[in-house]
Image: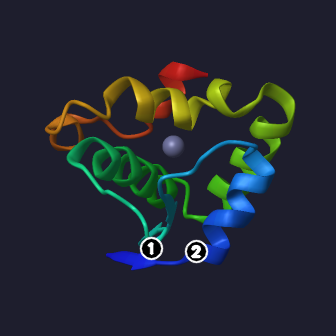
Amino acid sequence: MLITCNWLIRIAECILKMKVGAIAIFPFILVPASARMNDTLLNHEKIHLRQQLELLIIPFYIWYAIAFFRKGYLNISFEKEAYMNEKDLSYLKNRKLYSFRRYI
Ligand SMILES: [Zn+2]
């Protein structure tokens, strides 16, 4: 479910120091009011929702935060999996459980 949420997007942009098109916070995908959602971005965020569900949500955020501060945004296994597969719109249909582990 898509929800417009400018303030949380701005906080994420301050933390990540980059433009944020959307944020997946299970079970929602938060987007700025000015968002131009496309299939690739939507698929990227859906991959994160799947990752969150696999890790029972809260552990995902803890793991994500630790990895972010240790490795940086683009080296987080969750982001690597999402970026590598965001253009494959059938990826989630064929994805195996805990596939993010391949990107650690
Ligand atoms: Zn992402």
* Coordinates of residue 47 in the picture (x, y in percent): 37, 46
Q: In the displayed structure, does residue 64 sit left or right of residue 86?
A: right
Position of the C terminus by quadrant = top right
Compared to residue 57, the image places residue 19 above or below, namely: above
Disc 2 crowd, CA 10 A, few/some/many (<14, 14-19, 20+)? some
Kindly report the distance in space between the C-alpha atoms of the residues bearing marks 1 and 2: 6 Å
Which quarter of the figure has residue 69? top right
Q: Residue at x 32, y 28 (%)?
A: 85
* Coordinates of residue 58 in the picture (x, y in percent): 66, 65
Q: Do residues under tags 1 and 2 come within 8 Å of each other at their CB atoms? A: yes
Q: Secondary structure at mark 1?
A: loop
Q: Which mark is residue 33?
A: 1
Compared to residue 40, the image places residue 36 above or below, namely: below
**Camera-nearest residue between 54 and 48:** 48
Please name the residue that numbered disc 2 is placed on. Answer: 6
Q: In the displayed structure, does residue 12 sit left or right of residue 80?
A: right
Which quarter of the figure has residue 75? top right
Compared to residue 101, the image places residue 14 above or below, namely: below
Say what amino acid the circle numbered 2 marks: Asn
Q: Secondary structure at mark 2?
A: helix
**Sooner in the amino-acid sequence: mark 1 or mark 2:** 2
Disc 1 crowd, CA 10 A, few/some/many (<14, 14-19, 20+)? few
* Coordinates of residue 38 in the picture (x, y in percent): 25, 50
Q: In the displayed structure, does residue 104 sit left or right of residue 69?
A: left
Say what amino acid the circle numbered 1 marks: Ala
